[in-house]
Amino acid sequence: MRLLLISDIHGDVQKIPCLKKVVTSDRLDAIVICGDITHFGSLVSASLVFESLGHLGLPVFFVPGNCDPRELASKTTFKSSENLHGRCVMVFGRSMLGVGGCASGPFKTPFELSEAETAGVLENALGGCSFGSDLIVVSHDAPYGTRVDLTSFGQHVGSKVLREFVLSKNPILLMCGHIHEARGTDLLGATYIVNPGPLYRGFYSLVEIDGRVEATLHVFEKKG
C-alpha cells in the first residue's frame, strides 16, 4: 500500500493541484489527511477543499483537526471522503483507526478534546477494528515525547493518552500533524511515526507499507 500523506492544509486549496503530478507519477493507492483541512472554517470551507481533492482521483481518508468545524467530526463520509474519527475501517487489508482534534489549550480552537475524551474516542474506534490485521492510527495530535510533537521552543506538547495507546496497542504506523515545525519521523516502541508537515507550506509525505513501513518527506515549490 502506497499513501500520499498530507496534513494542515488550512484551507489553501491552491496547493492541492500541485499534488496531481505526485499522484500520477508515484502509483499511489489513497490519500490520508491528518486534520486542519480548514483554517477556522465552516463545513462550506471544508467542502471546497474536499472537492479539490476529489480531482486527484484517489480514495481519501481523513480526521478533522482542531482548526476544523466540530460538526465535521460527526460526518461518517464527507464529499465522498471517509472520516476516520472514532472509527476503524479496513483499507487494503489493514485496520485504519482515527482520532481528530487536539488537547484542550489556551487558544480555544473549534475542535479540542480532553485527554479523557481522546481515550474514549480511541477505545471506541478500536472496538470496530478487525483484530489480526495490521493496525494503523491516523491522528491530528502527535504522541507526547517524540520528535513530531516538539515545538520550536523545545517543548513536547503532544497527547500523553495517544502515547500510552501506541505503546499498549503497538500499531505498525501512526500518521499525525498539528505541530507544523515538527515535520519528521520517529519510532515509539515498535511504531513508526510520521508528521508530513503542513501542506499549506508545500510539505507532504509518501508512505509505503509492504511488510515494513517507510516514509519519505517531500516539498514542492509554490508554483507546483
Image: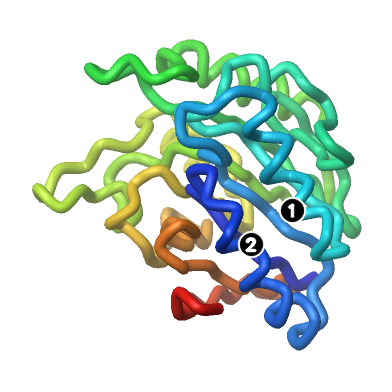
- Report the residue at 70% width, 41% height from top: 48
Task: Tell me how the rendering is colored.
Answer: rainbow
Is 144 placed left or right of 61 in the picture? left
Q: How many marks?
A: 2
Relative to the observer, which residue lies in front, 58 or 48? 48
Q: Are marks 1 and 2 in contact (CB under 8 Å)?
A: yes
Q: Position of residue 135 (x, y in %)?
A: 71, 48
Q: Quadrant of the N terminus?
A: bottom right
User: Mark 2, residues whose alpha carbon is within 10 Å: few (<14), some, or many (≥20)?
Assistant: many
Is 220 placed left or right of 130 in the picture? left
Is 147 placed left or right of 1 in the picture? left
Is 198 placed left or right of 153 in the picture? right
Q: Position of residue 133 (x, y in %)?
A: 83, 51
User: Mark 1, residues whose alpha carbon is within 10 Å: few (<14), some, or many (≥20)?
Assistant: some
Residue 98 seen in render: yes
Relative to the observer, which residue lies in front, 130 or 177? 177
Q: Earlier in the sequence, mark 1 or mark 2?
A: 2
Q: Quadrant of the C terminus?
A: bottom right
* Residue that badge 2 annotates: 16
Q: Secondary structure at mark 1?
A: helix
Is 185 situated above or below 224? Answer: above
Q: Which mark is residue 5?
A: none
Residue pushed farthest bottom? 25
Query: In the rendered structure, which amino acid carries the disc numbered 2?
Result: Ile
User: How far apart, in angstroms, are the residues tagged by discs 1 and 2?
Assistant: 7 Å
Query: In the rendered structure, which amino acid carries the disc numbered 1?
Result: Ser
Q: Position of residue 26 (x, y in %)?
A: 74, 84
- Report the residue at 57% width, 41% height from top: 37
Q: Secondary structure at mark 2?
A: helix
* Residue that badge 1 annotates: 52
